[in-house]
Amino acid sequence: MANKIKEEPNHSDESPPILGSWNKIYFLVFMVLIILIILFYIFSMAFD
Amino acid sequence: MCSFLVFVASYGTWKTRKTKNMDGYIRANRAAPWYIVTLSIMATQASAITFISTPGQAYVDGMRFVQFYLGLPIAMIILSITAVPIFHKLNIYTAYEYLEKRFDLKNRILSSLLFLTQRGLAAGFTIFAPALILSVILDLNINIAIFTMGGLVIIYTTVGGSVAVNKTHIQQMIIIMTGMFSAFFMIIYLLPPDISFRDAAFVAGKMGKFNTIDFSFDLENRYTFWTGIIGGTFLMLSYFGTDQSQVQRYLGGSSITQSKIGLLTNGIVKIPMQFFILFTGAMVFVFFQFVTPPLFFNPVQEGYVKSGTYSDEYKSLEKKYEVLKNEKQNQIREMLSSIDEKKESQVASIEKEIDDITKEENQIRNEAIALIKKTNPGADTNDTNYIFLTFIINYLPIGLIGLVLAAIISASMSSTSAELNALASTTVIDIYKRLIKKDASEAHYLKISKITTVLWGMYAIAFALFANNLGTLIEAVNILGSLVYGTILGIFLVAFYLKKIQGTPTFIAALIAEFVVLYCFFYTDIPFLWFNFIGCALVIVIAFILNIIISNHKIKSI
């Protein structure tokens, strides 16, 4: 028998503190990753 | 440095001595705002291994290790969408409680045991790394250093639990960042007067240390863009989504929003931080092009050979090494002049000469290592972990040495405390409370949590005593994680996304996947980052197939 776990009310639809939606925040994080990869590549090429 | 050690342990113990319930001991009362979640996540992951071994990794192998972290932001996004809301909603204390609700008890126990096995050993590594520092600086027996470091962390983690971990993480991160920035600026300051920061960057770049992004498809290459994005994503998903030492950090968030923002901020900040640490290692490399480094960076082993039978031979090798280093310095200065004058063909020609000198240097180092082995057959011939230490101890001013060492030891304490807290939580919640004593009082479980914290601390100390023979620390820790993370992640991904797959097919699939990963580790040359992907993929595929077979069998039986 599964152990009983007391569930809390679902708050997963809270808005984020900035940008208005979580999808925009995720997009921002993803874009930061892309920018870092590009910067690292330029950095590698610049001093090679 | 010693004052800091004692201060943090005392502060953590005193401020949290009133932790009186399991919610405080395991989830820090779920009161942490996002920036505490971020700091705590970073402090947990950034152990002393990060600061000792990573600069050495860059010195030896270049900065390509940064690719290991490219999957992190992607993993943080996925976890924010899936794991965080589920874990918060279920009001759980450990990640593995969720698996019983979704599947059954055996999946919960299997995942718990895989976590306990791996994390218990990893905690040994994180105690060993700063003990190494103390033994080198204070000329202490390393075993005494291991007992001292481990003992201090056990004290405040046992007394205060997760609250103590969070409170001490703040001070530790401040010291860590201050120490690392100080070390970096000192390296640049200590370069010869005619070598600018730009010159240093060109030296590192031309000598292959700025290999940060490698787009090649080479399955035998440990660190490429592809192993980082694919294997790294799976490793980070597993580490942050299923390893209780990290799950516990964001379970302490005061809301789903705070936990999500904490995770996502970590995803943004971590890669530049690792880049900076690797870059520091590359600058140490440049520094040692203008100052002759020791032939072998482990001062203890070098001391043995210099006072032994092969002393004269070793010293002769040191003289040859010095001559080569001086020749190389001249070539490097000529190369920099040619770069300034934009004489590209001349630069290429000098680069070739520098490469040839480097090969001769490596030959001399190999001969030196052979002498070390002859003097002490049991000696560890990998000195990567001592490179940054050697620079700190021999070239930084006294005050800064203490600060940087305090930073490194802070990092170790922050990781070890989180690990011990997580090990105790999983042991009590998933094993003891679930299987052995189900209806005891809160006070009883709190007492058992403290006892298990001490026991796991002692276990970690025991393994630390063994860790000396396991090569570059940063790689060893991540290899160990990759042996189980893929399987655990596979179980969780099936749980989150493949709702029709039941517990028994998942359990069998996990056992098979783990067997295959271990086989790959012992009998193949597959780079370890792929183990995460292999383990995870196998669990999903085999569970899917078995679920169909078992479902069909049940239908036929009916």
Image (cartoon, rainbow, N blue to C red):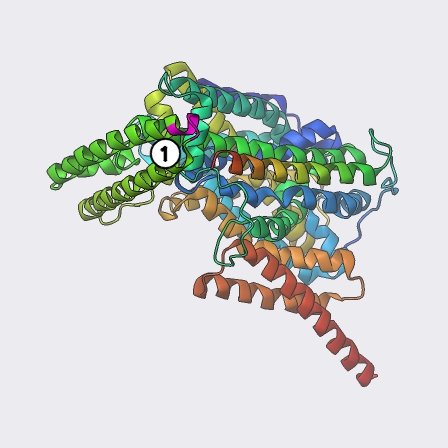
Q: Give the magenta part as a residue range.
A: B338-342
Q: Nearer the viewer, residue B479 or B202?
A: B202
Residue B348: percent from the left, percent from the top? Answer: 38, 39
Q: Is residue B471 above or below residue B389?
A: below
Q: Is residue A26 left or right of residue B430?
A: right
Q: Nearer the viewer, residue B177 or B405?
A: B177
Q: Is residue B34 above or below residue B230?
A: above
Residue B475: percent from the left, percent from the top? Answer: 46, 46
- Image point 73% across, 43% down: which residue? B77
- Image point 65% across, 68% down: which residue? B509
Res. B194 visible in picture? yes
Res. B455 visible in picture? no
Per the image, the residue denoted by label 1 is B387
Q: Is residue B415 left or right of residue B142?
A: right
User: Looking at the rendering, in which quadrant would you find the C terminus of chain B?
Assistant: bottom right
Pointer 1 indicates a residue of which chain?
Answer: B
